Amino acid sequence: MVTEWTYAAPPMVAAFFASAVEFIEAMTVVLAVSATRGWRGAAAGTGLAIAILLVMVAVLGPALTTVPLATMQMVIGGLLLLFGLRWLRKAILRYAGVIPMRDEDAAYAREEATLRLLGRATRRWDPVAVAASFKITMLEGIEVVFVVIAIGAGGTGLLIPASAGALLALILVIVVGALLHRPISSIPENALKFAVGTLLSAFGCFWIGESVGYGWPGGDWSITGLIAAFFAISALTVHPCRLCSRTGTAATNN
């Protein structure tokens, strides 16, 4: 039982945090749609997108089991590594002050203003509300599907814990959003992205090594070492980036 838990917990945690980040961004727009155009259209668009995403996971996930594991680990590991490094890069630049931090309250205000320009809903089922909610849920949800399938394809039986982590994140974000009726700005989303980038990079690196037959010290436990290494290197990179940004700004001002 302990062995099964240690095997299933890392992919579940990684999928949970990665999905939570995407779902928070989607919920911000859905809440704006609900406030300005009505909850029926917002709920319909979101529900339709979630149904399609669930079908994608159900169809694509098992289909990947027909591909040789080593090949799948190399391809998926490479994609996860690139995906994670992209998130880490943005997180490092945000903490260094090179690019602004994401502000869910500001994003909500912008979306709300845009929707108000389209006028009030004139029908019970507002096509604008349905389309806006469907679009943002699909855009953010496709990234979730990729992460879930990528994590699930890394080993036998990993799709279920990865899917469970994503589903738990979805339920949590929906419940919190419904209770607050406002953007979930109290959750440190930028910190979550930093953590998710670290997790995905570690998993990607681990599975690339597995695909070429590298014997990781400690087996699956070496993932924790990779996570710590990626986190430490990324955290140490923030300060030099901040200094470079200040130097560049000072040079420009002079």
Image (tube, helix red, strand yellow):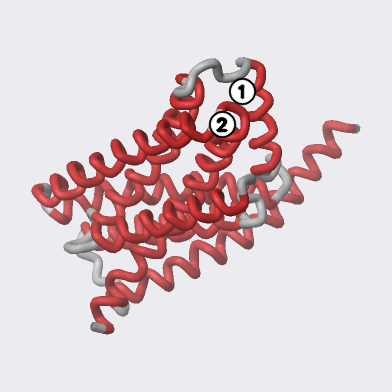
x and y percentages locating residue 142 in the rendered image: 37, 38
Residue 168 is labelled as: none
Establish if 245 lies above or below 136: below
On the question of residue 14 being in view, the answer is yes
Q: Nearer the viewer, residue 25 or 205?
A: 25
Mark 1–mark 2 distance (CA, rounded to whole Å): 7 Å
Q: Return the residue at label 1.
A: 115
Q: Locate the N terminus by quadrant.
A: bottom left
Cβ–Cβ under 8 Å for marks 1 and 2: yes
The quarter of the rendered structure image containing the C terminus is: top right
Left or right: residue 146 versus residue 158 is right
* Residue 232 drawn at (x, y percent): 56, 66
Residue shown at 68% from the left, 25% from the top: 113
Q: Extreme right residue here? A: 254
Residue visible at 43% across and 72% down in the picture: 225
User: Which is nearer the eye, 62 or 83?
Assistant: 62
Given the image, on which type of amino acid does mark 2 rest? Answer: Val
Viewer-nearest residue: 220 or 38:
38
Q: Earlier in the sequence, mark 1 or mark 2?
A: 2
Q: Nearer the viewer, residue 238 or 31?
A: 31
The x, y position of residue 229, in whole percent, is: 49, 67
Residue 121 vs 57, above or below: the answer is above
Query: Can you name the residue that lies furthest to the left here?
Result: 66
Give the residue type at disc 1.
Answer: Leu
At horizontal 41% and vertical 55% (from top left) the residue drawn is: 200
Q: Identify the mark at residue 33; answer none if there is no mark.
A: 2
What residue appears at the point 42 percent right and 52 percent down from the top-left corner?
Answer: 170
